[in-house]
Amino acid sequence: MVFERVGLADPLVLCRPLRRSSTSVKRPVPQVITRHLLQPPQLRSVLLQSLSMTTITFRTCLAGAMLTGLALQPVPAAHAAKTAFRLTDLDWRDPHLFAIVPVLGCLDLTNFNNFGVLGINPALQNAIQTDVDASGDLDLNLLVVFDPLNQAGSGGTLAFGEVTCTAPLATTTCEPYSPLPLYPYDNTPALCLGAVPGTTNAGYSPALITPGSPCFVAALGDIVLDVLFPLSLKDAYIAATYSGDPATGLVNGMLRGFLTEVNANSTILPASLAVVGGMPISSLLRGGVECCSQPSPATGDKDIGPGGAAGWYVYFNFMATVVPYAETPTAVRPGRVSSLELHAPMPNPFNPLTTIRYTLPRASLVAMDVHDAQGRRVALLVQGDRDAGEHVITWNGKDAGGVSVSSGVYFVRLEARGEVRVRKVVLLK
């Protein structure tokens, strides 16, 4: 997605999330306003509608077009300090996850916590609140940083992503691995986020909670969300209700995004998750090919998402509290690196072997492969969970079938937790 600045005389149409009708209402807005629009080309015809300088049209849209435009008003606010909120509770709400537990059969594992088996939500709470791997950091840290915290105005800019936060939870302080991506946010009450119509299951409990006013909402676009494993979501949004003024917490928070069937089939759950480790997440979702409950060709919980893609709208609820936050890392503690690193292969050029070192800032699901100059994958070197720290792998110049590749330029690609690093290597015979 591309952010475009639009002139003051240009119109702005915002999509209301909860209805499919074409009705619209008009609300007064300040005379002077700076507007930023998220404008995928296919939505410009929806966004660019006429209106007067003192009104914004809130138009209900189809599910794929909801909340496409977000207004920003840089008006001085009473609470303009940069403020960081760490997610202290994160719950996967919809769709639920199903798998076969030995002896017990096919069970809903979303909130399961019995017989030594932790479902996704108990495992998320453990990771958010504790330092299981004794690294000195809490195991899962997602942060929303408002710059500024502009509750009194129409919005501003926020950063959202994974950071590192010290243990224990009661005295935690947070700092970034690397600069967090920035997004515009909006405080308009009518834009508090809702579910895309027809994409939730009323039979699941607890039910999905939607934020109410006073709230913020931000369009995140396509993201990789760390929820014990990297979850690739398209057309993602985040919203929550402010608690306090100035806010000291965020409540009734919602994260929403679309998981395509293609990404679900390729997202392998980490071995650390009992029962489901090593399985594609699609096999846990109703409508997935190997799901034990309502498998394909049953529709199950499957939806149609942006661009007509098949998959699942995924919803989370969260709460967050204010934490101390260092804009840049204060120091790298012994034994910890600040970011994902892929070191230069040695030797390079090489024949017949080259050694590749990589360093992980925290335990991660890792994929490393080799591509030729045309972008075709020729070898898979690493696939699976790896601990934090330095790792070493060698490549013998052979493809996935064990056949030696020809001389030439190749690219080693490392991916972990949504970050990607690439190094060039040359094979000379």
Image (cartoon, grey):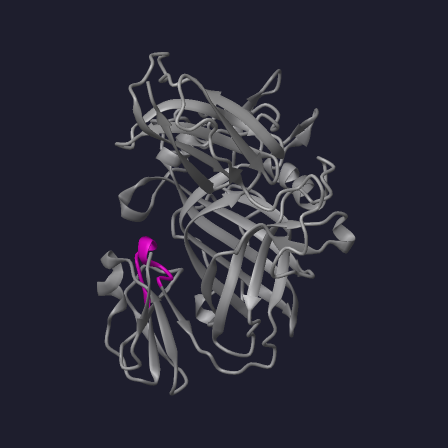
Query: Where's residue 220, x and y in %?
Result: 43, 56
Please indicate whether residue 423 sits to the left or right of residue 170 in the image: left
Q: Is residue 67 magenta?
A: yes
Where 261 falls versus 169 (above or below)? Answer: above
Q: Residue at x 53, y 83 (%)?
A: 76
* Along the line of sight, the residue nearer the viewer: 359 or 348: 348
| Residue 95, visible in the rendered structure | no
Q: Residue furthest left?
A: 45
Q: Quadrant of residue 68?
A: bottom left
* Quadrant location of the N terminus in the rendered image: bottom left
Q: Residue furthest bottom?
A: 31
* Along the line of sight, the residue nearer the viewer: 22 or 74: 74
Q: Residue at x 60, y 48 (%)?
A: 90
* Quadrant location of the C terminus in the rendered image: top left
Query: Where's residue 94, x and y in %?
Result: 50, 43
| Residue 396, visible in the rendered structure | yes
Query: Where's residue 410, x and y in %?
Result: 34, 29
Q: Residue at x 60, y 69 (%)?
A: 82
Query: Where's residue 98, x and y in %?
Result: 52, 29
Q: Residue at x 45, y 40 (%)?
A: 421
Please indicate whether residue 398 sits to the left or right of residue 283 in the image: left
Please indicate whether residue 149 sits to the left or right of residue 396 in the image: right
- So how many labels did they put on this image? 0
Which residues lie in the magenta part? 59-68
Q: Residue furthest top?
A: 402
Q: Is residue 82 magenta?
A: no
